Image: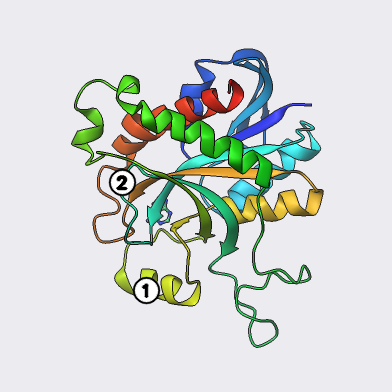
Amino acid sequence: MPIGIMSAMREEIETLIHEIEVSDKVIKGMRSYYKGNLWGKDVVLVFSRWGKVASATTATHLITDFNVDEILFTGVAGAVNDTLKIGDVVIGDPLYQHDMDASPLLEPFEVPLLGKKYFETDPLRNQLLSEASSRFLSDIRSHFESGVPEAFGIEDPKNLIGPVASGDQFISKRTQIERIGSELPGVLCVEMEGAAVAQVCYEYHVPFNIVRTISDKANDNSHIDFPKFATDIASRYARGIIKNYFRP
Ligand code: ADE
């Protein structure tokens, strides 16, 4: 059965579409699903669009219509932890929905009826992704024209496995980041899809993993050059890490 690869960045999926031997393209619910072979593996590629609803519906289609038996999400994230720098890689585990709050009926962050405040990702695949990412980062300059990583302030990027918080908000204000950092201590970065896809995968018993490249510090500058970062940096990260993951 194929591996579903999804991204909330069109640029990342387009880079992978250039590499896939496409066997079929299916349009459903305003998404294009590309079936085919990518570096020796059966895959379905899809650009999910942004946010929890967009990504949850896309993940559901991947599982129920395309029979994927594993979902891998790639994308960018804003750093919450001060030690993270632009260009670092976070492999998410576990994933919180930072905007889930049914209190006083339930505890903050608890997902109704599941009794869970977070979703875990597949541990073995996280190790394989971490190795794939470390290999990519150790040789990062070979994937870019000279000076491109440095132009984005990327010098000596590192790779971590750790908690990620998702919500339907682009985080760019100090008050937002302080709330998330204090209510969910240990969270490394924020994004807008991971925990929603993780919930779908949990409910369907499908292994889930997620790789995020730090694109910004979730502050006043977080929107600057966002599309350029996706095209010039994040799509090369996605390509390099997934290629290493498929060909250890
Ligand atoms: N994805 C990348 N940067 C982000 C941010 N600052 N907030 C939410 N999602 C993001």
Q: Which of 247 and 55 lies nearest the eye of the viewer?
A: 247
| Residue on which the image places disc 1 | 178
Circle 1 residues within 10 Å: few <14, some 14–19, many ≥20 = few
Q: Is residue 11 visible?
A: no
Q: Type of residue at label 1?
A: Glu
The image's colour scheme reads: rainbow
User: Based on the displayed image, in which of its 4 quarters is residue 139 positioned?
Assistant: top left
User: Considering the numbered disc 1 on the image, is that residue within a helix, a strand or a loop?
Assistant: helix
Residue 56 in percent (x, y) is at: 65, 50
Q: Residue at x 35, y 22 (%)?
A: 143
Q: Is residue 209 above or below residue 196?
A: above
Residue 180, visible in the rendered structure: yes
Which residue is labeled 2 in the image?
A: 86
Residue 235 falls in image quadrant? top left
Compare residues 121 and 112 and report the one nearer the observer: 121
Which of the marked residues, 1 or 2, is nearer the chain's N terminus? Answer: 2
Horizontally, residue 228 falls left or right of residue 102, namely left
| Alpha carbon distance from label 1 to label 2 | 19 Å
- Which percent across, then down, holds residue 3? 69, 30
